[in-house]
Image (spheres, rainbow, N blue to C red):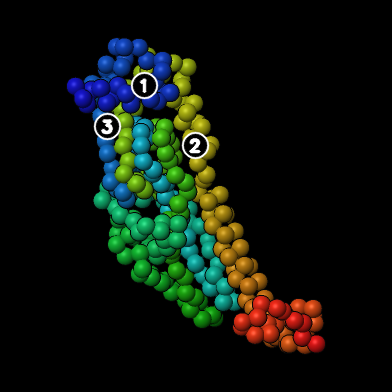
């Protein structure tokens, strides 16, 4: 009875289910569950169609990670990044996948054919491909996978409604509780008046940025960090070369104390 009441409270707390009548609430409580995830545990990574369970976040905070597979080449000492097209089969994320705490700076280098579960196990390893030209020196090309923290999901967020999850994974940042309902149940006519779930799915796909826009933002952040570093180094070098002398300080600013016991202050001439 406690678990049943907890499911009812979860349904009433979410505005999505205000239109449900008593019979629908009873059915939802019968087929639905409340699931808890520990920090850094995978919540959702793959869409399996109508058999997928839709999860509604009740408490805690989740993070959405986007995997960007790219090639890196060196040109005049500068890294050039190119985004690799999505493979048709995609990358299957493993349920047991773990990630370091600072996910926004996580950079793993791997081959495109590797499973992402193996990527996390060996994200410090470099795989270098050498391509030789008849008239040129060997060209070094690296394949890197960067995992970008796209955003966070909190109370009321919907997970698994059918949104685009190509090379994406949703993980728990803190302890998370979710109300889990079958997608097939939500898409029935009685629970889908006015195609509300299709409209919410359209909103999710419009809100979550695409791989291309995330990659563009990644390049802009790198350029900004390099620009900031160059400006700081330039200012530091000019500061070191142009040292101020005692004579550069105006006389009115040269204030010294007469002695430690006397609080009177005099100007030096």
Badge 2 marks a residue whose secondary structure is: helix
Quadrant of the frame with the N terminus: top left
- Position of residue 224 measured from the top left corner of the image (x, y, whole percent): 61, 63
Q: State whether residue 6 appears in this view.
A: yes
- Position of residue 131 measured from the top left corner of the image (x, y, whole percent): 46, 73
Q: CA distance from mark 1 to mark 2?
A: 26 Å
**Residue for badge 3:** 34
Q: CA distance from mark 3 to mark 2?
A: 25 Å
Considering only order in the chain, which callout, 3 or 1, is on the residue closer to the N terminus? 1
Question: Could you tell me which residue is drawn at 31 percent across and 49 percent down?
Answer: 39
**Residue for badge 1:** 12
Q: In the image, is residue 144 above or below residue 60? A: below
Front-most of 112 and 269?
269
Considering only order in the chain, which callout, 2 or 3, is on the residue closer to the N terminus? 3
Quadrant of the frame with the C terminus: bottom right
Q: Nearer the viewer, mark 1 or mark 3?
A: 1
- Position of residue 124 measured from the top left corner of the image (x, y, whole percent): 36, 68
* Mark 3 neighbour density, 10 Å: few (under 14) some (14–19) many (20 or more): some
**Residue for badge 2:** 205
Badge 3 marks a residue whose secondary structure is: strand
């Amino acid at each position: 009875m406690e678990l049943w009441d907890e499911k009812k409270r979860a349904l009433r707390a979410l505005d999505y289910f205000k239109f449900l009548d008593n019979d629908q609430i009873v059915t939802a409580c019968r087929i639905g569950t409340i699931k808890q995830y520990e920090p850094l545990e995978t919540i959702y990574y793959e869409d399996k169609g109508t058999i997928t369970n839709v999860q509604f976040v009740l408490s805690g905070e989740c993070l959405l990670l986007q995997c960007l597979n790219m090639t890196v080449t060196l040109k005049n000492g500068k890294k050039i990044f190119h985004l690799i097209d999505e493979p048709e089969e995609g990358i299957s994320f493993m349920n047991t996948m773990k990630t370091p705490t600072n996910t926004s700076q996580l950079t793993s280098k791997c081959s495109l054919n590797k499973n992402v579960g193996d990527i996390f196990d060996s994200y410090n390893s470099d795989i270098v491909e050498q391509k030789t030209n008849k008239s040129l020196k060997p060209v070094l090309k690296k394949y890197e996978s960067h995992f970008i923290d796209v955003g966070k999901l909190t109370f009321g967020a919907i997970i698994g409604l059918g949104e685009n999850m190509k090379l994406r994974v949703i993980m728990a940042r803190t302890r998370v509780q979710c109300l889990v309902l079958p997608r097939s149940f939500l898409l029935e006519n009685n629970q889908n008046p006015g195609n509300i779930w299709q409209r919410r799915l359209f909103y999710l796909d419009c809100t979550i940025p695409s791989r291309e826009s995330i990659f563009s933002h990644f390049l802009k952040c790198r350029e900004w960090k390099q620009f900031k570093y160059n400006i700081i180094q330039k200012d530091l070098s000019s500061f070191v070369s142009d040292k101020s002398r005692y004579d550069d300080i105006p006389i009115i600013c040269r204030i010294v104390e007469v002695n430690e016991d006397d609080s009177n202050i005099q100007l030096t001439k």
